[in-house]
Image (spheres, grey):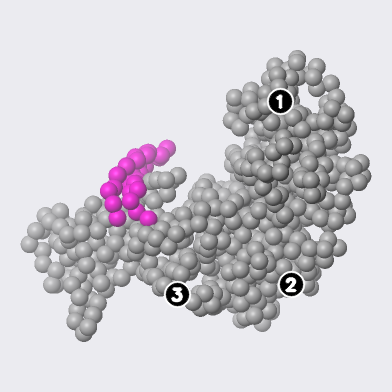
Amino acid sequence: DGMGETYRVMRQAVEVGDETYVSDFTLEEEEEKIEIVPRDLDEMAAKSYYDWREAESVYTFCKDETGLKVKPIFKRFTQENSPPTLYNHGFENMDSLGALYSRASSHIFGDWNACGKAMGLAPWQDHAWDKATTTTTETETKKKGKKMKQRIIPEMIDTPIVEGKLYKDGDLKINRMSMKGMPFIARVDSDMFDDEGNMVRTKRYDFDDNDYKGPNEEEEENNNNGEEKSDSESTSVSEKQLPTRVALDAIGLAARMQTDLETVGMDFVKHFKEETGETNLCLAGGVALNSVLNGRLCRELGFENTFVPPYPGDDGIAVGCCAYGLFGGQAEEKKSSAPKLWNEPLSPYLGPLPTSSEMAEAVEWAEPWLDVEIIKDEKRRIDILVEEISSGGVVAIYNGRSEMGPRALGHRSILADPRKKGLVRFINEFVKKRESFRPFAPSCLAEEASEWFDLGDYAAAVDNNVSPFMSLTAQVKKSKRDKIPAVTHVDGSSRLQTVTPEAGPFYHKLISAFYKATGVPMVLNTSFNTLKSEPIVETPRNAVRSFLSSMGTIEILVMGDYVIKRKDANVRRLLGEEQKNGLMTQPSFPIRAGAVDYKNTFTVDKDDISETKTFVRMPGRPMHNPKDEWFELVDDLEGQLLGLCDGSVGVNDIMTQFAAMSGDENQQFDKITDYDQVLFENIIRRLIRLNEHTLISW
């Protein structure tokens, strides 16, 4: 599936014999024309105010000693329903499977390219939540030792968004009624406010599953010897986030779209498997990122081999163009000098290889905020990671070339223990800063995968390496779900990555060591990015910035030979109370990380209550985010302190300056008054905060 090029442009290039322009019509054979839907496309395109674009395409391919032959056999086109000059060419308004899924994504998240989030939301359709009620009936029932609860269940949308057969002209039916009206991302329902009118649910889609337990609940249950508690004693209901009404509606839309995608997509692929007799399946296009559909295509349709590249979306066009330049469209006399065909998929690790000097420069850049140890021994680095992960910590690894495509596959990854369910909310909320409903993927040793996941008959043919690029979703075996709850979604599924020593030597060794320590042959894996709107980290500086921006929620970053931890603000050094060689050190002078810009905002609410906020922008600090440049300060005191931190004054000098501001220039600080103590504590707290956000160092 793909938006592709317009029909008129493709046809014109063929008609005028433009050899510099290549499309599927260039590959069309005279005796075997491409089947096109709609059949009267030439006439319809001529009348169309805009044009028509590719929707779904099917090819057969053959690779032998003579080379590679790809033949397009079917193409469905969809009309441009809005001006192509609109954002993204009006893709969301087109009638392809991918465009419809993007339309649902936009309606839910306000982002046409958040289809992966919609896919993760859909399985919640079959989940139910218990909400404690406060009715008189419940109060009376409690006295009898029982507790009544309201059951919350998402409603499924009955009418399909898309149905029919893609390969039959005029058979496809599309109903966008469920995506009309106000987008869910813009809805502000009453259940997002408290009784005082304050908005308390700013995250529409932040909710937990029904079995989620707050940080104190397990301890309370143990202390209670398993007896049920009253509302006044239990914290489970108040700590667990239930879905808002708009979240329930969003679940229904996501589930409807996912169901329709699978129904129509499975039928489409099955039809052409039967038509062609082909036994191997390759998938490309943005829809091929839907790992749930991919898993079903792989397991249920009887293909001998299924291949999904790690970059099936637009990013893979670069690889496709490269491949065509190497192997396609060559005259017969030139084929003898052509390079040998690839005999295996390209590695997903196609990004630039960071050099030792680049990593050293990144560490030096943020040195005041880092505790760094250089460990050449790979086994020792792995042991440090495994110890941290198995004890419940979160780590990050930055290893070798970066991944091409949207999945982190062990070179730019955040890792954690799949046995600890509480890490799902912790990583989502505090590390990734996103909605808590989103699931996490396991990276599993390929040789052990079939013991933990239902992989189907196909697994044996590929030595269990069914999903090296995290392309397929599989069901966790029921007997194993309690053992790996952090990577088991609410429907029992996991978007799986299988890891081999050939594809990922370091990663395989790391997971093997974790397996030896815990008996679990996998780790929780999510992409290494912690800043808002940040892609997966690419450079060593990106890695250090993202690590620091986790604010200590990522305990360790291993980058090459560097084992990096966050350095706590050393207040004793700041105050000159640190001993070195038996002597007290001199007080440190805090210094800004770079030039700073200030911005103040002034607001007055309906009750004439005014509020002033101060923001700063400091591009030179390691935690500076170019996409979210302005950092909000706590108050004016913090702003004044930042202005004083020029590397020439210590805390005592700063205290003296504030005394001067108050008009008492002769104030001495050998005798501390209550006011002085409060001021001193406030100054220290703010200096620590400025340090933690890499605005100052000492």
Question: Where 80 sits versus 207, above or below?
Answer: above
> At label 1, which amino acid type do we have?
Met
> At label 3, which amino acid type do we have?
Ile
Q: Which residue is mark 3?
A: 375
**297 relative position to 289: left or right:** right
Marks 1 and 2: CB-CB under 8 Å?
no
**642 relative position to 437: left or right:** left
Please state which of residues 422 and 370 is positioned toward the viewer in this rendering: 370
Spot occupied by residue 342 in the image (x, y as percentages of width and height): 70, 52
Q: Quadrant of residue 4?
A: top right
Marks 3 and 1: CB-CB under 8 Å?
no
Instruction: Quadrant for the C terminus, please.
Output: bottom left
Identity of the residue drawn at 34% across and 62% down = 364
Please state which of residues 262 and 511 is positioned toward the viewer in this rendering: 511
Q: Which residue is mark 2?
A: 448
Identity of the residue drawn at 33% across and 68% down = 569
Q: CA distance from mark 1 to mark 2?
A: 48 Å
Q: Is residue 297 magenta?
A: no
Furthest toward the top, the residue is 47
Q: Residues within 10 Å of mark 2 (few under 14, many from 20)?
A: some
Q: Residues within 10 Å of mark 1 (few under 14, many from 20)?
A: some
Spot occupied by residue 441 in the image (x, y as percentages of width and height): 66, 61
Spot occupied by residue 64 in the image (x, y as percentages of width and height): 80, 49
Q: Which residue is mark 1?
A: 10
> At label 2, which amino acid type do we have?
Glu
> Helix or strand or loop: what does disc 2 sit on?
helix
Q: CA distance from mark 3 to mark 2?
A: 30 Å
**527 relative position to 684: left or right:** right
Mark drawn on residue 286:
none
Question: Where 103 sits versus 432, above or below?
Answer: above
Q: Earlier in the sequence, mark 3 or mark 2?
A: 3
Q: Earlier in the sequence, mark 1 or mark 2?
A: 1
